[in-house]
Image (cartoon, rainbow, N blue to C red):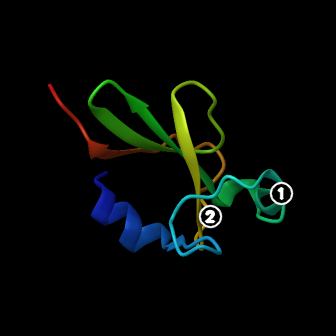
């Protein structure tokens, strides 16, 4: 799935400062965990994964639409070969 498809389907929610990134741990706890996504970067490539990730994490995103149990979603934001 690419970023535009993900954005249209899951509808990211802007944080209080208007950005898509959410790093306030207390605020994140107010959302359903299935609304949380992790922006991950490795080298020149970036992806968004559903759920919480720690390795290579840049930030978290929150969406209006929750992902479903058992789904393993990888959104290609920027990928170099």
SS type, badge 2:
loop
Whole-percent x, y for residue 4 in the image: 29, 65
* Residue 15 percent coordinates (x, y): 61, 70
Q: Which of the marked residues, 2 or 1, is nearer the chain's N terminus?
A: 1
Q: How many marks?
A: 2
| Cα distance between the residues tagged 2 and 1 | 15 Å
Residue toward you, 28 or 23: 23
Secondary structure of the residue carrying numbered label 1? loop
The quarter of the picture where the C terminus appears is: top left
| Residue drawn where x is 83% and y is 57% of the image | 29
Residue 1 to residue 13: above or below: above
| Image position of 74 (left or right of 59) | left
Residue on which the image places disc 2: 66
For the residue pair 6 and 25, the one nearer the viewer reads as 25
Residue at 26% over, 30% down: 44
Q: Which circle marks residue 29 in the picture?
A: 1
Q: Is the residue 27 above or below the residue 46 in the image?
A: below
- Residue ID at (68%, 56%): 34
Q: Indicate which label's residue lies in the foreground, 2 or 1.
A: 1
**Neighbourhood count class around disc 1 (C-alpha, 10 Å): few under 14, some 14–19, many 20 upward:** few
Q: Residue at 28%, 53% (x, y): give it.
A: 2
The percent coordinates of residue 1 (x first, y second) are: 31, 51
Tell me where residue 46 sits by quadrant.
top left
Q: Which mark is residue 74?
A: none
Q: Residue furthest left?
A: 81
Above/below status of 14 relative to 70: below
Dot 2 crowding, Cα within 10 Å, few <14, some 14–19, many 20+: some
**Residue toward you, 19 or 5:** 19
């Amino acid at each position: 799935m690419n970023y535009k498809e993900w954005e249209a389907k899951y509808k990211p929610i802007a944080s209080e400062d208007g950005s898509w990134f959410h790093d306030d741990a207390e605020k994140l706890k107010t959302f359903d965990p299935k609304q949380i996504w992790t922006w991950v970067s490795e080298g020149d490539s970036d992806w968004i994964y559903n759920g919480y990730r720690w390795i290579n994490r840049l930030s978290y995103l929150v969406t209006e639409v929750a992902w479903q149990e058992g789904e393993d979603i990888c959104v290609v934001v920027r990928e170099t070969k």
